[in-house]
Image (cartoon, rainbow, N blue to C red):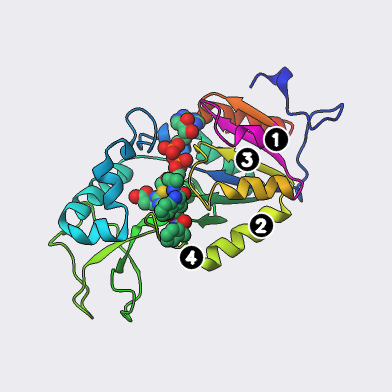
Amino acid sequence: MSSDESLYAGKSEPLRLRKDTKVTVLSGAGISAESGIPTFRGEDGLWQDENLVKIATPRGFLADPERGWRFYNERRSNMAACDPNPAHKAIAALERAGYDVVVITQNIDRLHQRAGSARVLELHGTVWSIKCSNSRCTSEPFENHDVPLKIDPPVCEICGAYLRPNVVFFEEMLDPEVVAEADRRTKQSDIFLVVGTSGVVYPAAGFAQIARAFGAYLVELNIETTPLSYICDKTILGPCGQMLPELVSDLTGGEVRI
Ligand code: BV8
């Protein structure tokens, strides 16, 4: 976004954040694309392979846990080799500068946290946590960063069921506490940034609609328009690794630059 296109909220002067302006970021796989992590629905997206989509369901994963762990282990290896890009860093810099920023992410890669963001809600869990696939088991999810994972496939020491990535599969409920916190924050938002998401997965995409309904100013950053573009006040087209740092600098009058 060029400087003369500074963000206007229908006012005569460019939109500027105050330290108490509530900024919420809904991020999707597109924010990690420039870090080298594949997206899901682009032409070479992960979900172009129907078999992989099946793995990301409870039944599909347990039908062939070894296949499932090969898929998730490949992704863990890829994510471990990738670093946060300027888009993640711009959001973290805004938070570090004392602005009120919360990230609601669909991503499972933890790149927001590695960039320094402390206030992150992981709607779909994370690939760096593992849990027992037996919902009645008393074991707790645990962090594991082994790359590669020692795959047998791993089974639970308590009940013997297969372990699985602590991510939200399709057809699975999201963590109600995370959803409630994301809903609460969304309804309070003054500025709601929709960054790098195709806006087709629910309930995640629904937070943009809630933000709209509760009066936030919505800005979408994407390389193409999406089904959420029509409810956004502004859509900034371009790679978010380039556009988001410019937007953050604009919104802070040049105070936050990375
Ligand atoms: C639920 C974790 C209640 C795993 C993911 C029929 C049966 C059952 C369910 C449904 C159904 N129909 C609808 C549903 C609901 C379903 C859903 O929404 N399906 C969609 C696909 C139609 N949702 C669910 O199942 C959710 N649970 O509803 O529970 C329930 C219970 C039982 C039965 C029914 C309902 C659970 C959803 C969570 C699924 N888990 N991931 C894993 O990752 O392995 S979802 C998956 O999609 C990813 O997590 C990803 O985060 C998410 C959203 O995708 P995006 O992040 O937006 O990524 P995408 O590739 O699509 O887009 C990237 C964007 O970036 C593009 O716009 C691109 O242009 C842009 N971009 C690219 N490069 C850049 C860029 N932008 C800027 N800069 C760049 N450089």
Q: Which of marks 3 and 2 precedes in the sequence?
A: 2
Q: Could you classify mark 3 by the number of other residues whose Cα lies within 10 Å: few (under 14), some (14-19), or many (20 or more)?
A: many
Q: Which residue is mark 1?
A: 255
Dividing the picture into quadrants, the one containing residue 83 is top left
Q: Is residue 104 left or right of residue 6?
A: left
Please state if 13 lies on the left or on the right of 201 as rendered: right
SS state under label 3: strand
Cβ of mark 2 under 8 A from ligand 1: no
Disc 3 target residue: 193
Rendered-image quadrant of the C terminus? top right
Foreground of the two, 210 or 19: 210
Q: Amino acid at mark 2?
A: Arg
Residue at far right of view: 12
- Whether ligand 1 has any atom under 8 Å from the Cβ at mark 1 is answered as no
Q: Are marks 1 and 2 in contact (CB under 8 Å)?
A: no
Residue for point 70% across, 55% down? 187
The tag on residue 185 is 2
Label 2 to label 4, Cα distance in Å?
A: 16 Å
Q: How far is the residue under mark 3 from the one under mark 1?
A: 19 Å
Whole-angstrom CA distance, mark 3 to mark 4, is 22 Å
Amino acid, disc 4: Asp
The location of residue 99, given as percent across then percent down, is 69, 48
User: Is residue 54 among what the camera can see?
Assistant: yes
Q: Quadrant of the N terminus?
A: top right
Segment tinted magenta in the rendering: 214-233
Q: Which mark is residue 175?
A: 4
Q: Are marks 3 and 4 in contact (CB under 8 Å)?
A: no
In the rendered structure, does residue 219 fall within the stretch colored magenta?
yes
